[in-house]
Image (cartoon, helix red, strand yellow):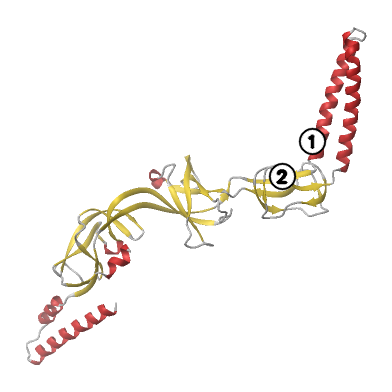
């Protein structure tokens, strides 16, 4: 930039000196000033088209959520006597998270077990008598039915007693602990919340006009405010076939790989979805493009002069734009310094921009 400024100053001083000399001789005119200005090269920065892969992208925002998020409720009433996990702990399905006072339930289970054992003994003692025809079939069937009823009652009491141990319904992380030691719980009171964060999801709202660009399997990059510059991968797994009449959009479900655990449900994220890829495309810096009257043009540099040329463009992404027609790889275009240029203008070209845009 310093070199460019120096060049401009030198050229301006030279032009001014010529103009003053002409004024001293009485020959200067407006035409002379315009001629001097037209003959003065304009400092510009240039670049050459180059080839690279370019992706058409769509940006959206959404809140990250978990599809595996389960409240853990008390299935029996009781006092909390022991807490075995805390928020942030990893747990597996079936793991005991807390214990309630289940002494009464245990005694009811033992009473049911005693009645079952007595009924089983009575039934087994009468098997031989039934085979010899010494008791009626009705009496023997009644013993069998009583035994089956007591077996079911015992299993129910056993299950109820086991419910005094609050267990994790899924694998995941303890997202919330809602209970305290000594607290009395009723049936269906929420004790914990378990969330599986290894795989998260987000629901993206796609306008009707953009729907044709998306398909299941398209990939996306995710960025969250708490970790700027870090990108996380996601994949479009489902697209709803029906429109949301409230806002006129379709819902796409993005699945996020969070094996590292950096992301958390509730985070607000920006999604950049790549829906089309052109390999080995010819591209130029988007800053070189001049859009006017629905026509895209660039200034092409040749022999120290510029020519304005119409071009056809394709995908624009990441500061670059794809060239479909109108330019070749060996040509040089103006990227910085368009102001005041017209076809035939002389330029003093610097290729500093090339590294900046292609680096």
What residue appears at the point 33 percent right and 53 percent down from the top-left corner? 54
- Per the rendering, the mark at residue 159 is 1
Residue at the limit of the structure toward the top, as seen here = 133
What residue appears at the point 71 percent right and 55 percent down from the top-left corner? 86
Q: Which of 173/313 is in front?
A: 173
Classify residue 31 by image quadrant.
bottom left
Q: In this figure, which residue is indicated by the disc labeled 2?
A: 95
- Above or below, 113 relative to 85: above
Q: Which of 208/75 is in front?
A: 75
Number of numbered labels in the structure image: 2
Residue 157 in the image: x percent, y percent?
83, 34
Category of crowding for the residue at label 2, using alpha-carbon neighbours closer than 10 angstroms: few (below 14), some (14–19), many (at least 20)? some
Could you tell whether 149 is left or right of 257 in the image?
Answer: right
Residue 95 in the image: x percent, y percent?
72, 44
Residue 42 in the image: x percent, y percent?
20, 74
Q: Secondary structure at mark 1?
A: helix
- Above or below, 71 relative to 303: above
Tags 1 and 2 touching, CB below 8 Å: no
Could you tell whether 255 is left or right of 148 in the image?
Answer: left
What residue appears at the point 84 percent right and 30 percent down from the top-left corner? 154
Residue at the limit of the structure toward the bottom, as seen here = 24
Residue 159 in the image: x percent, y percent?
79, 35
């Amino acid at each position: 930039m310093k070199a460019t400024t120096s060049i401009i100053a030198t050229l301006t001083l030279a032009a001014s000196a010529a103009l003053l000399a002409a004024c001293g001789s009485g020959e200067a005119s407006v035409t002379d000033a315009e001629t001097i200005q037209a003959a003065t090269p304009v400092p510009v920065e240039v670049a050459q088209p180059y080839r690279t892969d370019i992706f058409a992208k769509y940006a959206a925002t959404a809140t990250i959520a978990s599809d595996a998020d389960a409240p853990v409720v008390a299935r029996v009433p009781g006092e909390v006597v022991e807490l075995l996990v805390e928020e942030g702990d990893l747990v597996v399905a079936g793991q005991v998270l807390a214990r309630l006072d289940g002494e009464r339930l245990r005694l009811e289970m033992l009473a049911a077990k005693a009645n079952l054992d007595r009924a089983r003994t009575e039934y087994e003692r009468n098997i031989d008598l039934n085979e010899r025809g010494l008791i009626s079939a009705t009496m023997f069937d009644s013993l069998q039915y009583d035994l089956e009823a007591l077996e079911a009652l015992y299993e129910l009491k056993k299950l109820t007693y086991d419910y005094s141990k609050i267990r994790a319904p899924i694998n995941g992380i303890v997202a919330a602990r809602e209970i305290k030691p000594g607290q009395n719980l009723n049936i269906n009171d929420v004790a914990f919340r378990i969330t599986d964060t290894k795989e998260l999801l987000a629901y993206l709202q796609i306008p009707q006009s953009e729907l044709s660009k998306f398909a299941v399997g398209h990939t996306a990059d995710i960025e969250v405010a708490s970790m700027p510059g870090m990108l996380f991968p996601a994949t479009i797994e489902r697209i709803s076939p029906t429109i949301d009449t409230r806002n006129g959009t379709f819902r796409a479900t993005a699945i996020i790989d969070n094996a590292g655990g950096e992301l958390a449900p509730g985070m607000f994220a920006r999604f950049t979805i790549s829906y089309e890829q052109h390999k080995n495309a010819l591209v130029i810096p988007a800053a070189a493009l001049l859009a006017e009257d629905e026509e895209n043009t660039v200034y092409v540099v040749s022999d120290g002069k510029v020519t304005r040329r119409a071009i056809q463009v394709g995908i624009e992404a990441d500061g670059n734009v794809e060239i479909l027609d109108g330019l070749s790889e060996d040509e040089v275009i103006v990227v910085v310094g368009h102001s005041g240029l017209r076809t035939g203008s002389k330029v003093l070209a610097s290729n500093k921009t090339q590294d900046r845009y292609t680096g």
